[in-house]
Every structure is written in C-alpha cells, then in structure tokens.
Amino acid sequence: MGTFSPIVLTVTNNNGIFINNATSDFYNPPTNIEGTFYYFVEITNSIPDNGDGGYKTVTIKSEVAILTVDSQIHAQIPTITSQPTSATVIFSKPHNLTTVANVSDGGILTYRWFSNNNASNIGGNEIVNATSATFSPPTGIAGTYYYFVEVTNSITDNGDGGNKTATRRSNVITLTVNPQVHAQMPNITTQPVSATITVNNSLNLSVSASRSDGGTLIYQWYSNTSESNSGGSIITGATSSSYSLPTGTAGTYYYFVEVKNTISDNGDGGIKSASIRSNAVTIIINQNPLASDFIIGNLNQTVGNVTAVTITPKAGKTNGTITVLYNGSTALPSTAGTYTVTFNVAASTGWNAVNGLAGGTLTVASLSTIIINLVDMNEWDLAQQTAQVQPNTNRLFSVTGNYSTYKWYLDGVLVSSSSTYTFNQPVNTYQLVVVVTNSNGESRSGRCWITVSAN
C-alpha cells in the first residue's frame, strides 16, 4: 500500500502556493488578518519503486475551501445626543442633570456621574450611586460646582479580542447654587418726632424707611405706657408710614412704629421678613384752661380783712401756678371798692399757659360784715376762706342771698339759726361753718377760718 502525503496550498490565480510545514491531514490557517482566503490540499500516493518503470506516485487535489476571517468586533462609542446643561438654582431646591445617549450596536449603556473642582471633564471624582442618565446634585450649600457624566457602551464578548466597552464623557457643566435669600432689615431714615400740642389740635407722626432688596415695606404703630419701643399695644388700623393720633384728651402719650420688609418666598428656607422698630416718642397734649375749670372764692370781703381771692382747679383738673390780679395788679386791695379779678395760669403738665382768665368781681365793703362764700355741698373741700378779727370785738358774718334756713356752727357747735351770726371770741383760731337751705331743700355751705389776734 502506498503512502499519502497531503500538501495544503493557498490559491492564487488558480495556482497553489505551498504553505510551509502544512503536510498533515489537517491545517489551522491563521485568522489574525481579516479577509477572504482560499485553501485546497494536494494528496500524493507513493509506492516503492520496484524498477518496473511504472508510476510510483499519483497526486490528487481537493476542492478549494473558502475561509472568511471577519474583522474584530469593537463596542461602539456612545453618541451623546443631549448634553447636561449648566444652571443656576435656588438654595435647597431639587435640580436634575440629564443626558441622552445612544448606540446602534445593541450594546448596553451605563452611566457614571463625576464632580470636579474646575470646569473640565478630565479627571474628576466619581459620585457614589450616581449611575443613571439623570442625577440630582445636592443644593444645600451655596457655591459653584462642576459635573459631567461618563457613558459606557458594553457588548457581549465573543472572544475575538475586540474592545467590548467604549466610553464617552459629556461636556462639563457649571451648577451655581445661590445662597439663601434673606429679607433686608429696613433702614429708618427719618424717625418720628416728639411733640407738645393742645387738645384737639391735629398731629401726624411719620416715619421714612428704605430697603434695597425690592421688598415691600409695611408699618404698624404702637402705643406704650412709657417712652420705650419694647412691648407696647398695637393700634388697630394704624398701618401706614404716618399716623394721625387722637388729641381729644390732655395727657402724656408714647408711640413708636414697627417697619417690616417682606420679600417673596422662593422656597430656599431663607428669612423672608425683617423688622425694625423706631425710636419711641413722647406726645404731650395740653389743655387750654378755662375759667370754668376753677372754683373762685373770697370775692366779698371787708376792709381790714382782705385776703387773696382763692382760685382752685376743680376736681380732675391739673394744678398749676396761678397768678391773681386785681384791676390788673397783683397787690391785694386795701380800700373798699369793686375790683375786677383776672388770673393767669402758667404752663404745667396738662395745661398750656393762658393769661387774663376772668375771675369775677371782688367787692370790698366798708362795713364790718364778713361775707362767707357759699359752695355746693359736693364742693365742700373747696369751701374755705380766712378772716382776721380783733379779740372780744363783735364781727358780723353773713352770706349773699336769701334762704329758707340758716345753720351756723362754731367749731362744730350750732351757735345760730339766723341769717347772720355775730362773732365775739378771745384770741384763738376758730372754724365757722354756715349751712343754708333754699325752698327746694337744696343745701349750700361755706367755711371760714377765723384768726383772733391782737396784732
């Protein structure tokens, strides 16, 4: 039996090219170059040469085999069709960064987001768990931040040695997180001013304030019990930059205004209103005194016993310095006659200064009769006058007018029920009281302190 000797050849122009060392019945062609290659094998049968001149070898060629070597399959680099975009955001407000990418090789896209310390997509720090096409960066700290995303395409590894992953990084974006916006404290440029006025005169308190953040200024006026802008009571409806205060009652009053600046709430958690209080002001409302605000006594007197006309504020009226004038002079009359009494009221708490109030007519009689002034019983505390007489000398006391009954009391003891009383006592001080009643049963009284002195 002969011996088979296969020889593998590649085909070029229908001719074979011997492949070195390809002499077995199988052959592993190279596949590291892509393309189409053609192979056949030549098989030779050889027998021993016995010298008879016959053909000792015979050769046959196989069919041509076509070998196509495909190129390596590499993952496609992703195409980013929508880049993430830079933005300026409100403090603590959620914000999403998004990218859109695709491939046509059927690969799987994965994402990794990075932060960086500059506007570059080189380097960077991978953000843990930021592995989707959308990333919500933190916005709780104001500042400028830089982000980008890396998109990776992965295909199945078929063992051909190709690159089975391909990566592309997006553009870097700048994210600016604005700081919290707080309302600006208003600036009071003109404070309200203290004032002194007269009852029922109008007075407006006003304030001027400014701010530069575009907020809205609102006002609230307060009253207080002292010159302080702490505490206080809200004045209903007093919500403008000026306040027309009530002036119908004399007294001392205290006011201040609170100015509040309010801005729109953008949801960043900032303080959206800020307030400031003005200085407290003191408003003094004085009254113009009238003659009717006073009780006037000692208008009927006797020569030698003339005492000053008494002018006393009625209950609830304010005391003040009062100057009495007799026919325009402050000197007490010393002779009989009729005198026009006027009086001046000096300025004091609750009063304005007023001159020339009418005090009535003072009658100084030349008789020895001393007239006791009568007042209504509810003004008893104001029923008092004084007289000086000689010891053990008759002095007649009387009242003006006619009454149904008369009661005279000396130091609390009833001494007469006549219309007059004759006084005659030794040196001492006495209180003489007279109580009269008219036909209607209405009572009036008068009181006189009598000093009996030899001087």
Image (tube, rainbow, N blue to C red):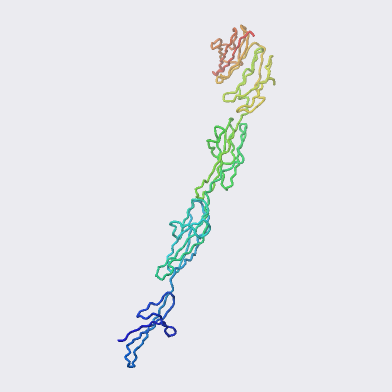
Instruction: Assign the C terminus to one quadrant of the image.
Output: top right
Toward the viewer: 242 or 306?
242
Up-down relation of residue 226 to residue 110 (above or below):
above
State left or right for residue 449 relative to residue 68: right
Seen in the picture, residue 128 relative to 194 is either above or below; the reply is below
- Where is residue 240? Give x, y as percent: 58, 41
Camera sees residue 424:
no
Which of the two residues, 201 or 321, is positioned nearer the viewer here? Answer: 321
Question: Where is residue 210 shown, x and y percent of the image?
Answer: 60, 44
In the rendered image, the residue lying farthest to the front is: 51
What x and y, as percent, mark residue 247? Answer: 59, 33
Judge whether 100 appears above or below 367 on screen. below
Image quadrant occupied by the N terminus = bottom left
Going 32% across and 85% down the picture, which residue do you hit? 3
Which quadrant holds residue 367?
top right
Residue 234 against residue 73 in the figure, above or below:
above
Q: How many marks?
A: 0
Kindly give the residue lying farthest to the bottom in the view shown: 52
- Tell me which corner region of the image, top left, top right, bottom left or bottom right, holds residue 33: bottom left
In the rendered image, residue 181, in percent from the top left (x then y), is placed at 53, 48
User: Residue 54 vs residue 180: left or right?
Assistant: left
Nearer to us in this view, 361 or 213: 213
Q: Nearer the viewer, residue 339 or 416?
A: 339
Does the image show residue 185?
yes
Residue at 44%, 85% (x, y): give it. 13
